[in-house]
């Protein structure tokens, strides 16, 4: 079994009107009963193809939701050598949980700046971050532009 089997994709809510939009990425009812709050942060990228991540965490889970633009969330299980790609677009209001041990990278897609909100189960600890590219030169992932 791969850690990729533990990735969760949840449907959030997005409402728009003349004033703008409200993006609810994650509700308490969607969290596991043992969920722990570490920190909440925002990731931004302004150029098509920019990569944010390409690392894994030994102990920390992360949840990602794209609130502006589009990104491809690339995942790699280094123990099994398996890869997965999830297209995330602000209008879809998807939230994806990446469990500890999976390499991950948000890759901006298109000309609109990508902004993602992320929630981690622990505060940032440089000792928990391991550089790990999600793309293999032998088997590159195909990007799906938004």
Image (spheres, helix red, strand yellow):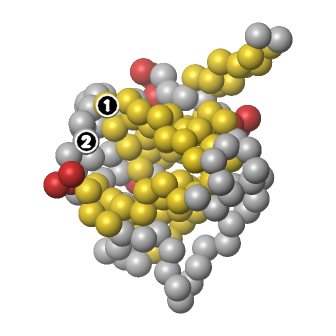
Q: Which quarter shows the N terminus?
A: bottom left
> Which residue is located at x 49 percent, y 81 percent?
136
Give the class, few, some or many, for how many residues have Cα within 10 Å of label 2's Cα (few <14, many ≥20): few
Q: Position of residue 83 (x, y in %)?
A: 50, 71
Q: Disc 2 versus disc 1: distance between alpha carbons?
A: 8 Å
Residue under circle 2?
124
Above or below for 40 versus 78: above
Q: Which is nearer the eye, 1 or 65? A: 65
Does 16 sit left or right of 45 as displayed?
Answer: right
> Which residue is located at x 47 percent, y 35 percent?
42
Q: Residue furthest bottom?
A: 138
Under circle 2, the secondary element is: loop
Q: Position of residue 16 (x, y in %)?
A: 76, 18
* Total labels drawn: 2
Q: Residue furthest front?
A: 46
User: Can residue 108 be seen in this snapshot?
Assistant: yes
User: Can residue 1 be seen in this snapshot?
Assistant: no
> Which residue is located at x 58 percent, y 58 percent?
50
Above or below for 116 versus 37: below
Q: Which is nearer the eye, 36 or 114? A: 114
Q: Residue furthest right?
A: 18
Q: Position of residue 38 (x, y in %)?
A: 27, 32
Q: Position of residue 43 (x, y in %)?
A: 49, 41
> Which residue is located at x 48 percent, y 63 percent?
75
Does 104 sit left or right of 99 as displayed?
Answer: right
2 or 1: tag closer to the N-terminus: 1
Q: Residue furthest top?
A: 19
Above or below for 46 versus 118: below
Residue under circle 1?
39
Marks 2 & 1, CB-CB < 8 Å contact: yes
């Amino acid at each position: 079994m791969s850690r990729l089997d533990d990735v969760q994709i949840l449907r959030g809510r997005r409402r728009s009107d003349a004033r703008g939009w409200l993006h609810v990425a994650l509700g308490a009812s969607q969290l596991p009963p043992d969920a722990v709050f570490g920190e909440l942060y925002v990731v931004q990228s302004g150029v098509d193809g920019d990569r944010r991540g390409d690392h894994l965490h030994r102990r920390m889970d992360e949840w990602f939701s794209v609130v502006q633009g589009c990104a491809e969330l690339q995942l790699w299980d280094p123990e099994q050598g398996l890869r997965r790609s999830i297209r995330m677009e602000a209008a879809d209001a998807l939230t994806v949980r990446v469990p500890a041990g999976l390499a991950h990278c948000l890759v901006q897609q298109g000309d609109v700046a990508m902004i993602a909100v992320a929630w981690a189960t622990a505060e940032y600890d440089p000792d928990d971050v391991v550089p790990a590219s999600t793309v293999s030169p032998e088997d590159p992932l195909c990007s799906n532009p938004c």
